[in-house]
Image (spheres, grey):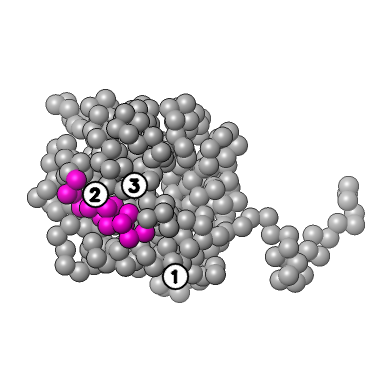
Amino acid sequence: MAFPRQRPRRLRSTPALRRLVAQTSLEPRHLVLPMFVADGIAEPRLIASMPGVVQHTRDSLRVAAAAAVEAGVGGLMLFGVPREQDKDASGSCGLDPDGILNVALGDLAADLGDATVLMADTCLDEFTDHGHCGIVDSAGRVDNDATNEQYVKLAVAQAHSGAAVVGPSGMMDGQVAAIRDGLDDAGYPDVAILAYAAKFASSFYGPFREAVGSSLLGDRRTYQQDGGNAREALREITLDLEEGADIVMVKPAMAYLDIVAAAAEISPVPVAAYQVSGEYAMITAAAANGWVDGRAAALESLTCIRRAGADIVLTYWAADAARWLS
Ligand code: PBG
């Protein structure tokens, strides 16, 4: 044995020692809370597959957002849920300044100002009647460049409404460059891009589809990545960096921690990971059955996502965890 006197347990013997030598920190500022705001509802609507998460009304969103910021979260990521009758093939209600996401961004920007980092999901799937993340051509394929043109308009509308960070999540080629140019041209050079750089076609998004009332039939495998492809994930991350991403994100988180670690290794910009709806749902369901300690499992999962290399974690536990940690 090379180090016969080593006894690692010595450093585990008291809580104070364990605290002293803890390598990974988890602080409220590391956590971003994804929130849903729905048009045409009078009361917050429960999301059955995500107990504890709701579709907010404009008013309940303001209250919950202020409370999350008070708890110390690092930022808020907003998703809009339009009325079914407002959806169309191009997702135009996402661009409408009076559309639900844009008015809610305006509300929160007015309420919270610089007290938080306000982010918006820059994607079309919530707004399209077919549920795809882009414009579908006559052959039924998502048209990359036509979609990017729509993303630019969406990003500019969100910046105009008060978003400090836009989050393109549609996995079109060239989306970051297109949005960067569009924001600069429109007079928003300081609005940052959180690029969903390595986003995998994942069954762990299941509950999210309920959360946003997605109309998707089929799948997203022509634009989101295959779960087994690590090299391709690094290629996507590198491209987004070249295109001007300010933060690169890996999504989902727990089954993709090797990608998070690889991203942290190569990225000159902060790395985020998205602990998605299915990850939240699994732990919450197990906890409801008494099979795991929900709070402990949530905090452990978040700490380990940080350990893998994520500077920032998007998680539906952000506000709860911020309170648990303080
Ligand atoms: C696309 C988008 C999705 C999620 C975030 N942005 C859904 C998808 O790609 O199908 C999933 C988030 C989650 O599951 O928590 N706008």
Q: Find numbered disc 2 in the image and state the secondary structure of the residue it sits on.
A: helix
Does 305 appear in magenta? no
Q: Position of residue 41 (x, y in %)?
A: 16, 63
Please, what is the three-letter code of the amino acid marked with disc 3? Ala
- Return the residue nearer the eye: 188 or 288: 188
Q: Which residues are magenta?
A: 97-112
Q: Residue at position x 48%, y 52% from top?
A: 313
Please, what is the three-letter code of the amino acid marked with disc 1? Ala
Quadrant in which the C terminus appears = bottom right
Q: Which residue is mark 1?
A: 287
Sequence-first tag of 3 and 2:
2
Q: Residue at position x 75%, y 67% from top?
A: 17
Q: Find numbered disc 1 in the image and state the secondary structure of the residue it sits on.
A: helix
Q: Which residue is mark 2?
A: 102
Say which mark, if any, is on residue 253.
Answer: none
* Label 3–label 1 contact, CB within 8 A: no
Q: Which residue is mark 3?
A: 163
Q: Residues within 10 Å of mark 2 (few under 14, many from 20)?
A: many
Cα separation between marks 3 and 2? 9 Å
- Return the residue nearer the eye: 192 or 282: 192
Q: Residue at position x 31%, y 28% from top?
A: 185
Sequence-first tag of 3 and 1:
3
